[in-house]
Image (cartoon, helix red, strand yellow):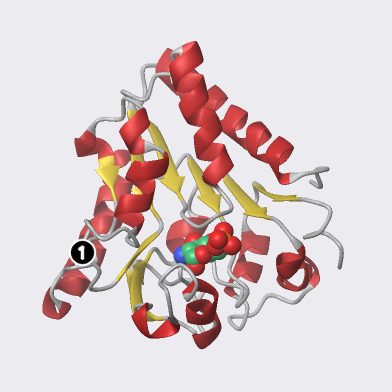
């Protein structure tokens, strides 16, 4: 779906999430949301915060699972995804802290595998992801599933691509400060969500969006595995859709 601008698209996806939350609450069920970081979803979170403040949108029955976290970055660091999610969403709505799940970047290397399997188990035991929000990196990563990621991959530790670290360098005041690894949900974890919405804005995403949507499925562009999913929508603005 191509929107005139990313603001309109962000409002549309926030309203889809809000409708799902209300539907689940009406049925007396928790709403399981897979959430993303990066600049792309910021206005989605802003609209959800507005709906909470002005219309009383209730997050008390929402359970969240974030896609990823930088490895060896403390939660208190302003670059951590833990910090990002609290700054943009969790600090402003009534989600219960015990219902927030983000991979723990500071887990010891020898405990990473167990931590990742526990993350998978927590998603399963919550009932699976009702909705997964995604951005996309210029390498074709979703979450931090960099080129080479298997379509059946699960939550795990991954080494970041050089281009991904270049793109993050401005936020970190230099590439040498960007972590070289991250913990990310896998392609299979993401594709098991019952509904997926991917957001991409601006001309820098045009080429990878063309390859993701029109290219062959390949582990070289992990986002192409979303083509396997029966209920995925890609929301674009005019610039990011320019190569389609
Ligand atoms: C990071 C995140 C991804 C995100 C990507 C794109 O790499 N791990 O989940 O999709 O950035 O970021 P942006 O939305 O800022 O372009």
Q: Residues within 10 Å of mark 1 (few under 14, many from 20)?
A: some
Whether residue 143 is visible: no
Q: Quadrant of residue 88?
A: top left
Q: In the displayed structure, does residue 112 sit left or right of residue 202? A: left
Q: Position of residue 196 (x, y in %)?
A: 58, 48
For this view, does 32 lie left or right of residue 238? Answer: left
Tag 1 secondary structure:
loop
Residue 130 visible in the shown view? yes
Which quadrant of the rendered structure holds the C terminus?
A: bottom right
Residue 129 screen position, x and y as percent: 43, 44
| Residue extending furthest toward the front | 173
What residue is shown at x 22% (from left), y 36% (from top)?
97
Q: Give the residue drawn at x 25%, y 37%.
A: 99
**In percent of the image, x 43 and y 40: which residue is there?**
33
Location of residue 67 with respect to 7 vertically, above or below: below
- Give the left or right position of residue 207, taking residue 99 as reference: right
Point 37% across, 25% down: residue: 59
Picture quarter containing residue 58? top left
Q: Nearer the viewer, residue 144 or 131?
A: 144
Mark 1, residue position: 74
The picture places residue 207, in percent across and down from the top left corner, at 77, 73
Viewer-proximal residue among 144 and 148: 144
Q: How many marks?
A: 1
The answer to whether residue 158 is above or below residue 104 is: below
Q: Nearer the viewer, residue 125 or 53?
A: 53
Question: What percent of the width, then of the height, locates residue 52?
Answer: 45, 20
């Amino acid at each position: 779906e191509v929107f005139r601008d990313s603001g309109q698209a962000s409002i549309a996806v926030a309203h889809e999430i809000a409708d799902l939350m209300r539907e689940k609450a009406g049925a007396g069920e928790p709403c399981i949301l897979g959430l993303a970081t990066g600049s792309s979803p910021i206005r989605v979170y802003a609209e959800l915060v507005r709906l909470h403040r002005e219309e009383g949108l209730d997050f008390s029955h929402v359970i969240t699972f974030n896609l990823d976290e930088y490895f060896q970055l403390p939660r208190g660091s302003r670059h951590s995804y833990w910090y990002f999610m609290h700054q943009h969403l969790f600090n402003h709505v009534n989600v219960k802290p015990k219902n927030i799940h983000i991979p723990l970047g500071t887990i010891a290397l020898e405990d990473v595998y167990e931590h990742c399997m526990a993350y998978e188990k927590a998603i399963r035991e919550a009932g699976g992801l009702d909705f997964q929000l995604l951005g996309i990196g210029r390498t074709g990563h979703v979450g931090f599933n960099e080129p080479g990621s298997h379509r059946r991959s699960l939550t795990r530790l991954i080494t970041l691509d050089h281009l991904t670290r270049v793109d993050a360098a401005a936020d970190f005041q230099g590439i040498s400060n960007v972590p070289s690894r991250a913990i990310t949900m896998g392609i299979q974890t993401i594709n098991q969500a019952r509904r997926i919405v991917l957001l991409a804005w601006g001309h820098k995403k045009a080429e990878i969006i063309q390859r993701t949507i029109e290219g062959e499925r390949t582990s070289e562009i992990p986002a192409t595995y979303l083509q396997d999913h029966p209920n995925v929508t890609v929301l674009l603005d005019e610039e990011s859709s320019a190569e389609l």
